[in-house]
Each structure stands twice: as structure tokens, then as C-alpha cells.
Image (cartoon, grey):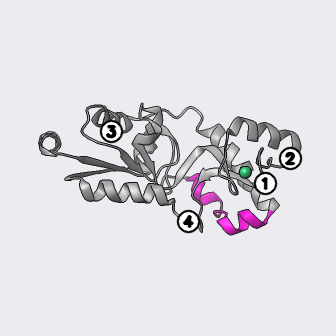
Amino acid sequence: MTESLDASIAALQDMIQDARIVAGFTGAGISTESGIPDFRSPDSPWMRHKPIPFELFQHSAEARREAWRRKFAMDDLYRDARPSVGHLGFASLVAAGRMPAVITQNIDGLHQASGLTADQVIELHGNGTYAKCLACGLRHELDWVRRCFESDGDPPDCRICGGILKTATVSFGQTMPDEAMRRAQKLTTSCDLFLVAG
Ligand SMILES: [Zn+2]
């Protein structure tokens, strides 16, 4: 077993060595080692509640309150999550100039926490570490949203335009982000090694 694992690692090293451009792609599995459960983890918190579809979030103040309640409860559970060896491995490939960017389905910000810049992470499902206005797109920090929510019982509106604030993630029913999709497609078609983890 060890021998075949060693052989696999050596083969992967050769493939990385020989590749001109390596593309990285990660999913929830890379963050389970960091303590963030995925959908299939035992007692997964993701299965406890039905997801709130985007349209309901837009049209129901109660759905928005529920979404923010869940969000802050999850943040408290996973506040101490740190990058895993997997995240660090991808970061080292980026630092070595072998991988232009990591494409990820994750919203936990752990690739950025492992040292990558925002530009080096292509987030297909957005980012759960800040909020965005659905009308004007302005970024709002979660600490502020949380303070307002806890004092008023309602999530605040956009500071500039009064629009609805939502975590900067892509919900069920919400369109995939154009720019991230375009960059992911370009990297995928230009690479000669595609490394998938998690
Ligand atoms: Zn706005």
C-alpha cells in the first residue's frame, strides 16, 4: 500500500514537473481536514436544513432572517478552521509559478488563508466571508452585518443604495458568476495538467 502510494506520489511529481501549465480544482473534500464538513460528512449541518432558494431570499424578509441566523451559527462553529495540507500544497504550486490559479467550488476562503491572493482563487460559488449588495454589488463586512442583525433582529440594507444584502455566495437558483466562469474555462482549456482535489 505504502509502496503504491509512494509510486503514485512520484508519478504525480513527474506529471507536475513535465507540465507547462497546471490548473487546480478543489471541492468541499479539501476543507473537511480543516474541520468543515461537506454534504456527505456524518451529521452534516448542510443536510439539517433545506437550502433557501435565491428567489425566496429575495422576496421574503423571514427567509432572509433565517438565512442570516444560519450563517452566523455556522460561522461560530467553523471560526477556527485553518488551511489543510491540501490547501498549502496548492498554494506552494501557485507560489512556484506552476499553477496560475486555483478554481474552487468552496466558499470558505481557506485558499486565501493559505496565502493566495483574491486573484489567484477563481470562486465558482462565490465567497462566504463577506456580504454583497444584490442591487449595486457593494461589499459589506460580516462583522458589521452581524452587529446590525443582533441589535435590530433584521439584517441591514446596503449602506449606499438600500438594496438587499446577502453573503457573496451563489445560492440555489442564482446565476453562476460570469467572470469566474470565463476565467475557469480559459484556465481549463489552456492547461496541460488538471489537478482535482476534494
Ligand atoms: Zn447597494
Q: Which residue is mark 1?
A: 65
Q: Which residue is mark 2?
A: 153
Q: Mark 1 is on which residue type?
A: Arg
- For image coordinates 72% across by 62% down, the residue present is 57
Which of discs 4 and 1 lies nearer the camera? The answer is 4
- For image coordinates 23% across by 53% down, the residue present is 191
Q: Which residue is mark 4?
A: 175
- For image coordinates 45% across by 44% down, the residue present is 32
Of 197 and 46, nearer the camera is 197
Q: Is residue 128 magenta?
A: no
Q: Is residue 48 magenta?
A: yes
- Give the extent of the magenta segment: 44-60
- For image coordinates 73% across by 64% down, the residue present is 58
Of 133 and 51, nearer the camera is 133
Whether pointer 2 and pointer 1 mark residues with C-beta atoms closer than 8 Å, the reply is yes
Query: Real-space Cα distance between discs 2 and 4?
Result: 29 Å
Q: Which residue is mark 3?
A: 90
Query: Real-space Cα distance between discs 1 and 3?
Result: 36 Å
